[in-house]
Image (cartoon, grey):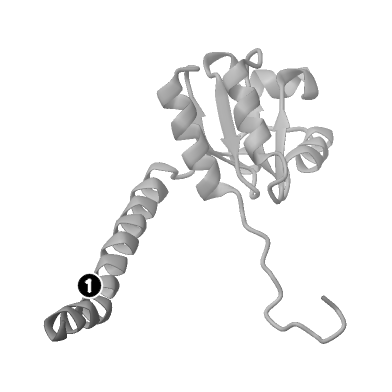
Amino acid sequence: MKYLKTIAILIMIVGFPAGSWLFLQHGLEWRKVKRDQLVPKTHLMNELDWSPEEQMQLKELFYYKTTLLLCKDASVQSEVVTDQFKDAFTFQVKTPSDLPSSFTEKLDIKRHQYMIIDTGMVVRQLYPDDTEATISRLVEDLALIVPQRKERDIKVRGKE
């Protein structure tokens, strides 16, 4: 019985923190790999030629919003993704019918199925098809890109 207590205490003191560290280290490595995959592809404002009116429309549509652009017809899988992120902070879904025709030509969306545009109007990732592997990658990338609403650090009594 004495040895059993000693082993249990050692597991709690050494085993749990070591296991937790290993688990968190794996998550950190995953985030680093994903961050490297999501390098900016195109900055919408700086790298494409827009008229002043188009620039204003572009800012209204994409500035400070994380956008999932459905480049082709919505499928069941894309509806699952939009349902999962619909309440996320700054998240929106756009289709080519929501955009002016000049935008669809300049963005060249006919070659892709999905496009992620972050809050700084930068195209982060393009997805060519609608396979299950692509959808799971899309969900992972959106989970990393969509900003989280910062909660207040100090809670004032009576204002909760």
Locate residue 152: give its quadrant. bottom right
Residue that carries the numbered disc 1 in the rendered image: 15
Residue sticking out furthest to the right: 158
Query: Of helix, strand and loop, which one carries label 1?
Result: helix
Q: Is residue 19 above or below residue 62?
A: below
Q: Position of residue 118 (x, y in %)?
A: 61, 45
**On the rendered image, what quadrant is the C terminus found in?**
bottom right
Q: Is residue 63 above or below residue 78?
A: below
Number of residues whose C-alpha sits closer than 10 Å to that of mark 1, classed few (under 14), some (14–19) or many (20 or more): few
Q: Is residue 12 left or right of residue 94?
A: left
* Direction from residue 46 to residue 58 in the image, left or right: right
Q: Where, quadrant-wise, is the N terminus in this rendering? A: bottom left
Where is residue 104, by image quadrant?
Answer: top right
Name the residue type under label 1. Answer: Gly
Q: Is residue 41 visible?
A: no
Residue at figure coordinates x 65%, y 16% from the top left: 74
Q: Is residue 95 left or right of residue 142?
A: right
From the viewer's perspective, is residue 1 above or below residue 110?
below
Residue 128: x and y, percent? 47, 19
Nearer to me, 77 or 43: 77
Q: From the viewer's perspective, is 156 left or right of 48?
A: right
Say which of 61 and 137 sits in front. 137
**Visible residue check, residue 86:** yes
Q: Residue 14 location in percent, x, y? A: 22, 78
Residue at the (67%, 33%) spot, across then down? 83
